[in-house]
Image (cartoon, helix red, strand yellow):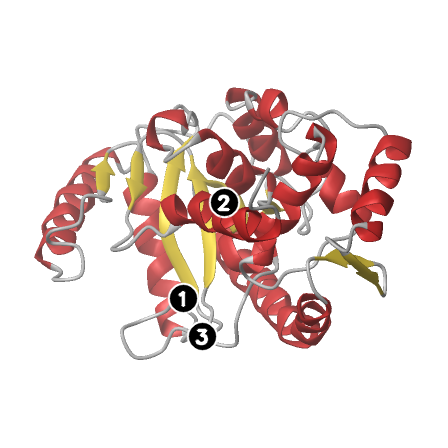
């Protein structure tokens, strides 16, 4: 198996762990350090089909017909979750000091299940992360759109917040490939200018995924005006920050978590981070496909 074939198989195997089939363009976008042309990619896919490594049907490419069927069947649920995500993003974006709302993880990757929540990366003006978050949470909880211990499916998970002066996420990555995939599958729902700045700060993604192109527009029109009064509510911001730290650390879900980052310019909290397993699962699938490679 040549390097081009292996590169294509890696992408399909990566998404195959969730039974997610891909289109031709999607495979090209996610090729890792392999800048193939359309012609080269088409020839490589054909070769892999002839070797019975890939299946092509209904415009999708996958390791098996079952993955293509699962991807098609997922579309109805995915449409509902996308509509819910836009509604949630509209509510979040109307909050003062919020500059961008970006869809991420399972719904953005189109690997969602029926019980999936909706994950967002939210970017705020400097010095107002916790004030803006408190307001957004209040609105979502009143409307019954924020997840809790009993209800998660189709509800918002606001577990990742950054400020505009702290957009470099390299220091929080688990590995280069997974981090690149995580960023590349994000979908800006509001604040495309701030999303563009986020990509610019993390532009190493273009070295890892040379065919990938960032989103050009957000799904909700408009951007927040720059030049906000960052001193306003400064005392309240500090109070909410310290109260948030205390509340989070008392939560049994996060008390012993090594994945909790709670600082003035970032809030990143997950009780369990499954991302380190993604490359291992991809490798296991590849070993089954080509045990002697």
Q: How far apart are marks 3 and 1 (CA)?
A: 14 Å
Q: Which of 163 and 231 is in front in this view?
A: 163
Provide the residue designation for mark 1: 140
The mark nearer the N terminus, 1 or 2, is 1
The location of residue 98, given as percent across then percent down, is 46, 43
Q: Which dot, 3 or 2, sits closer to the camera? A: 2
Which residue is depicted at the point 55% across and 53% down? Answer: 288
Q: In this view, does 256 lie above or below 157?
A: above
Q: Can residue 118 be seen in this view?
A: yes
Which residue is depicted at the point 78% across and 47% down? Answer: 48
Q: Which of 157 and 101 is in front in this view?
A: 157
Q: Which of 188 and 144 is in front in this view?
A: 188
The location of residue 205, given as percent across then percent down, is 57, 26
As helix, strand or loop, the secondary structure at mark 1 comes to: helix
Provide the residue designation for mark 2: 283
As helix, strand or loop, the secondary structure at mark 2 comes to: helix
Provide the residue designation for mark 3: 153
Question: Quick check: 137 left or right of 240?
Answer: right
Which residue is depicted at the point 37% across and 44% down? Answer: 276
The location of residue 78, given as percent across then percent down, is 63, 69
Q: Is residue 121 above or below residue 232?
A: below
Locate residue 231: give its quadrant.
Answer: top left
Image quadrant in which the N terminus is located: top right
């Amino acid at each position: 198996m040549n390097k081009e074939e292996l590169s294509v198989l890696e992408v399909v195997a990566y998404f195959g762990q969730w039974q997610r089939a891909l289109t031709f363009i999607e495979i090209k976008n996610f090729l890792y350090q392999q800048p193939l042309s359309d012609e080269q990619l088409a020839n490589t896919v054909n070769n892999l089909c002839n070797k019975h490594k890939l299946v092509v049907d209904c415009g999708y490419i996958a390791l098996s017909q079952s993955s293509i069927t699962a991807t098609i069947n997922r579309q109805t649920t995915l449409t509902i979750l996308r509509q819910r995500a836009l509604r949630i993003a509209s509510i979040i974006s109307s909050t003062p000091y919020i500059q961008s709302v970006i869809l991420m993880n399972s719904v953005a990757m189109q690997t969602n299940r029926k019980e999936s929540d909706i994950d967002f990366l939210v970017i705020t003006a400097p010095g107002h992360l916790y004030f803006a978050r408190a307001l957004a949470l209040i609105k979502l909880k009143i409307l019954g759109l924020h997840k809790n211990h009993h209800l998660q499916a189709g509800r918002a998970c606001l577990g990742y917040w950054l400020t505009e002066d702290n957009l470099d996420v390299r220091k929080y990555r688990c590995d280069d490939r997974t981090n690149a995939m995580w960023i590349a599958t994000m979908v800006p729902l509001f604040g495309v200018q701030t999303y563009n700045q986020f990509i610019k700060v993390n532009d190493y993604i273009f070295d890892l995924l040379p065919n990938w192109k960032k989103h050009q527009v957000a799904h909700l029109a408009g951007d927040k005006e720059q030049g906000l009064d960052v001193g306003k509510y400064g005392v309240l911001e500090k109070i909410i920050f310290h109260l948030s730290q205390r509340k989070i650390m008392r939560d049994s879900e996060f008390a012993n978590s090594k994945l909790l980052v709670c600082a003035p310019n970032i809030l990143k909290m997950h009780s369990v981070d499954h991302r380190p397993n993604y490359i291992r699962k991809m490798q296991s699938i590849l070993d089954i496909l080509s045990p002697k490679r």
